[in-house]
Amino acid sequence: MPKVKTNCAAKKRFKLTATGKIKRKHAFHSHILTKKSTKRKHNLVKSTLVEGANMNAVKELLAMR
């Protein structure tokens, strides 16, 4: 069996926490920021965790299965 390769795009976008969860950044914070409120932009800066429904798909991209 060949080795399972890690997806290069995914390894740049996701980080693993100490407890095994996967951290991600919010989308919609790169351009067209003038129409977005300050509160909305501030909340987009914070990182969050990958939801359970997408966890298996992300783990497969990171070759963790």
Image (cartoon, grey):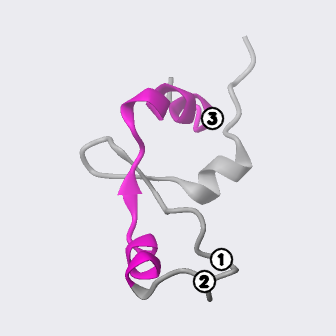
Element class at badge 1 = loop
Q: Is residue 10 magenta?
A: no
Q: Are marks 3 and 2 in contact (CB under 8 Å)?
A: no
Residue 59 locus on image (x, y percent): 51, 32
Which residue type carries mark 2?
A: Lys
- List the residue tagged with mark 2: 35
- Is the stretch drawn in magenta largely helix, strand or loop? helix
Task: Give the answer, above or below, for where 18 lies relative to 46.
Answer: above
> CA gap, disc 3 to disc 2?
34 Å
Horizontal side of 1 relative to 51 (left or right) equals right
Question: Of callouts 1 and 2, which one flags the residue occurring earlier in the amino acid sequence?
Answer: 1
Q: Give whichever of 61, 33 is nearer the camera.
A: 33
Q: Is residue 49 magenta?
A: yes
Element class at badge 3 = helix
> CA gap, disc 1 to disc 2?
13 Å
In the picture, the quarter occupied by the N terminus is top right
Q: Give whichever of 28, 1 is nearer the camera.
A: 28
Residue at (37% x, 31% y) in the render? 52
User: Over which residues does the magenta segment extend?
Assistant: 39-63
- List the residue tagged with mark 1: 30
Element class at badge 2 = loop
Residue at (24% x, 44% y) in the render? 19
Question: Of callouts 1 and 3, which one flags the residue occurring earlier in the amino acid sequence?
Answer: 1
Marker disc for residue 61: 3
Residue at the extreme top of the image, as rendered: 1
